Amino acid sequence: MALDLATRDQLIDTVRRFVAERLRPLEAKVAEDDAVPDDVLAEMRQLGLFGLSIPEEYGGLDLSMEDECLVGLELGRTSPAFRSAFGTNVGIGSQGLVMFGTDEQKQRYLPGIASGEIVTSFALTEPEAGSDSASVQTRAVRDGDVYVLNGIKRFITNANKASLFTVMTRSDPEKKGAAGVTAFLVPRDLPGLSVGKPEKKMGQHGAHICDVIFDNVRVPAENRLGAEGEGFKVAMQVLDRGRLHISAVCVGVAERLITDCVAYAQERKQFGQPIAGFQLVQAMIADSKTEALAARALTLETARKRDAGQSVTLEAAAAKYFASEMVGRVADRAVQIFGGSGYVADHGIERLYRDVRIFRIYEGTSQIQQVVIARETLKRGG
Ligand code: COS
């Protein structure tokens, strides 16, 4: 649902102020502690951030994709670890349920997801199924009115906090690939489900990824999400949407970095003048600005198309591909403009440089986006 313009502007303004006044001052501490403080999480819940995309009838803000992207742009102006705290609830952890869940499943889980009382995770990736997600091996075997799950999921965002997982399994071993995949909603407290230690990562400290292990986990059949064999479609549609949200966050980080670069270039003097006066520095700023504007336009245009009911598989992949690669280049130029100061920790530039690297990998690598873009373009005939 689209908010009326005044409400939308008010929400964006609130998020902007929360990011500038509350989150940005905490960036270094969150990275150092590898944790977002509980009082900040409580404020995020109060602001409704966990429920941005959840339908209003279940207590969410029910934002249109365009409005969610506009909020994503604001959230990108600080460490991506903050967004990650509620990002799974807004995207990959909730949208399978929103798009494919029964009324009963929605009533049971969505209010808690919207309020942030339930944290969600999306368990697709496995040790042997990364980009090739149709080859998942986690088994689901029907046993009366339950399915018994066995297997390991890897690099699962927010798994250590999650109380509800959307899990992609192989329910029919005879059917290879996508056709044998079935999705389930799996509560954390079922016996046999355990979560590994958070991985030590290159960046986005404060956001966590872990293994999730299923050892004879008995999941009630009523927790199946969609029909048997429909799980891959669930995953792909969730990712189509998630990729757009990530694109918006990439643009937000790029805009933040450009602002930081401009401020620094105007203040830093070399050869007797601010380095902003040098055309080679200006060229880097111009390239970053141009690319950020292009990514912003592509992301918002695609969000509007999705809101209008069009399929955006190609465009969402293109937005994710371009925006994630773009922010990598912008972060690299930022280190260059800041020079030695960009390489040391004080200004936070090297931290963002590390933080943005994962955008080219998660929710589908750049190479997977290229595959999707090429396939869809060939299918469409141009
Ligand atoms: N929406 C709806 N259905 C889709 C879809 C989409 N975006 N993409 C594929 N499908 C359907 C296809 O239509 C096909 O259905 P039918 O067999 O009924 O025709 C089925 O899913 C299989 O599709 P496809 O043959 O394209 O599957 P592939 O195994 O070739 O895989 C890619 C396709 C590579 C695109 C997919 O595996 C992928 O996106 N991988 C990356 C996964 C990822 O992002 N992982 C990150 C971790 S999650 S944070």
Image (spheres, rainbow, N blue to C red):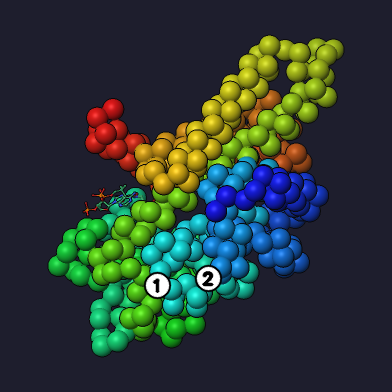
Q: How many marks?
A: 2
Q: CA distance from mark 1 to mark 2?
A: 11 Å
Looking at marks 1 and 2 on the same chain, the residue that comes earlier in the sequence is marked by: 1
Residue 284 pos. (x, y %): 63, 20
Q: Amino acid at mark 1?
A: Thr
Q: Of all residues shown, which one is farthest toward the bottom? A: 144
Determine the image quadrant of residue 173. bottom left
Q: Circle 1 is placed at which residue position?
A: 102
Residue in the picture at 54% in, 28% down: 294
Instruction: Assign a secondary structure to mark 1.
Output: loop
Residue in the picture at 40% in, 69% down: 101
- Viewer can see residue 95: yes
Q: Circle 2 is placed at which residue position?
A: 110
Q: Nearer the viewer, residue 14 or 201?
A: 14
Left or right of residue 318, residue 161 in this image: right
Left or right of residue 168, residue 105 in this image: right
Left or right of residue 121, residue 268 in this image: right
Q: Is mark 1 within 8 Å of ligand 1?
A: no
Instruction: Assign a secondary structure to mark 2.
Output: helix
Q: Nearer the viewer, residue 322 or 302?
A: 302
Q: Of all residues shown, which one is farthest toward the left? A: 174
Residue 199 pos. (x, y %): 52, 61
Question: Counting other residues with Cα less than 10 Å from the Cα at mark 2, is it few (<14), some (14-19), or many (20 or more)?
Answer: many
Q: Nearer the viewer, residue 226 or 146?
A: 226
Q: Amino acid at mark 2?
A: Leu
